[in-house]
Amino acid sequence: MASISISLTLIFTLTTLAHSDSSPPSLTPIEQHSVYTILASINPRIDWHSLYPDDADLCDSGPHGLVCDLFTDPKTNRPSLHVTELALGFVSDSSPNPPCSPNASLSATFLAPLKYLKSSSSTAASPTPPALFGSFGSFGGFKRLRKLVLIGSGVSGGIGDWVGELVEMEQMRISRNRLDGVVSGEIGQLRRLRVLDLSFNFFDGTVPESIGGLSKLLKLDLGSNRFVGRIPESFVGLTNLVFMDLSRNRFSANCGIPLFLAEMQSLKEVYLSGNPLGGQIPEIWKNLGGILGIGFSGMGLVGNIPGSMGVFLRNLSYLSLENNRLEGECQRSLGC
Ligand SMILES: *[C@@H]1O[C@H](CO)[C@@H](O)[C@H](O)[C@H]1NC(C)=O
Ligand SMILES: *[C@@H]1O[C@H](CO)[C@@H](O)[C@H](O)[C@H]1NC(C)=O
């Protein structure tokens, strides 16, 4: 065993010598410092410097959740190491990310030097107390960020015009925080977005029409906020959307369930509960046979439950219509 590992080490050393004219690349002192600052801010009780004494340790055997990638400078051809992913707090029992302390805080300024960051996540599972406090601030500098997961923390602030710079973003999941204010229409610049989850925050104002231009979107969850006004007609452009949850907001200006749902033929789940849209349930179900779940409770709906729902929605497994003023006989085809 010993001789095998020695020869492996030798081979490694020889290849390293053959392929580079200097020492192996390491994190720049600025990025290294930034990582220690972040670790210290999420959990000041852990002596991170003793646990992971230098930058080689930070990237090679540093905390789980920290991922570095090798880049090659196109001019000098020299390799360099950069932090590309950062995951903090509880993810699962098998992913021991750096644990957040109850008074953890994270500010975008700490992350700013990590220009190569592609993915950043932080989650706190209940019953853990909120893991991160502080301001959401501006993530606009992270032009390479593809995935932002910041769930169940105490982060405050809003989504300003800076969001338009995150053009690589594919998943933005920032539910269950203390985020508020009007969502900037610049969010429509995130053309690669597939998942947008802003649920369980305090966002208000109208929903930007520009979200309707995010044609790659598969999941849109704006549930449990304070959005008002119309559900944008532009959503008809979300031709790939599978999941749409707008429930528990204050949408009221549409006068009834939006008819454009009829054209969103990829939809499998649609939840509008708790918005005072009123009106009757429209006859829009002909092309929506793929729908599995509908939540239309507490919407002030009146009139009959259309028989066409039972005819076309053959795969429906969840239907919630309580707390309305619907009347008439419930169709046998809907399981009554
Ligand atoms: C968090 O708590 C620890 C001790 O429990 C304390 O040393 C540290 O200063 C606190 N950090 C903040 C940001 O309040
Ligand atoms: C209903 O479900 C079946 C079985 O999963 C599937 O084959 C079928 O395509 C679904 N119907 C629609 C209209 O999506």
Image (cartoon, rainbow, N blue to C red):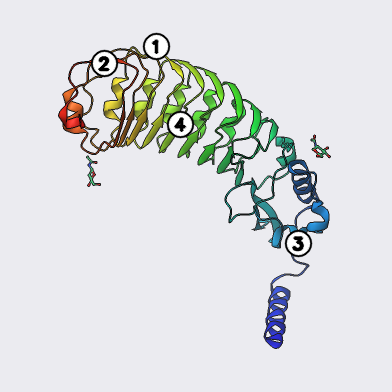
Q: Is residue 258 above or below residue 242?
A: above
Front disc: 2 or 1? 2
Point out the quarter of the image occupied by ligand 2.
top left
**Distance between mark 3 and mark 4 Cα atoms:** 40 Å
**Distance between mark 4 and mark 1 Cα atoms:** 19 Å
**Distance between mark 3 and mark 1 Cα atoms:** 57 Å
Q: Earlier in the sequence, mark 2 or mark 3?
A: 3
Where, by quadrant of the figure, is residue 63 drawn?
bottom right
Q: Earlier in the sequence, mark 2 or mark 1?
A: 1
**Distance between mark 2 and mark 1 Cα atoms:** 20 Å
Where, by quadrant of the figure, is residue 232 drawn?
top left
Tag 1 residue: 253
Query: What amino acid is found at the position of numbered circle 1 in the picture?
Result: Ala
Tag 2 residue: 326
Query: What amino acid is found at the position of numbered circle 4 in the picture?
Result: Asp
**Distance between mark 2 and mark 3 Cα atoms:** 66 Å
Q: Residue at x 20, y 37 (%)?
A: 314
Tag 4 residue: 221
Front disc: 3 or 1? 1
Query: What amino acid is found at the position of numbered circle 3 in the picture?
Result: Ala
Query: What amino acid is found at the position of numbered circle 2 in the picture?
Result: Leu
Name the one closer to the observer, 116 or 182.
Answer: 182
Front disc: 3 or 4? 4
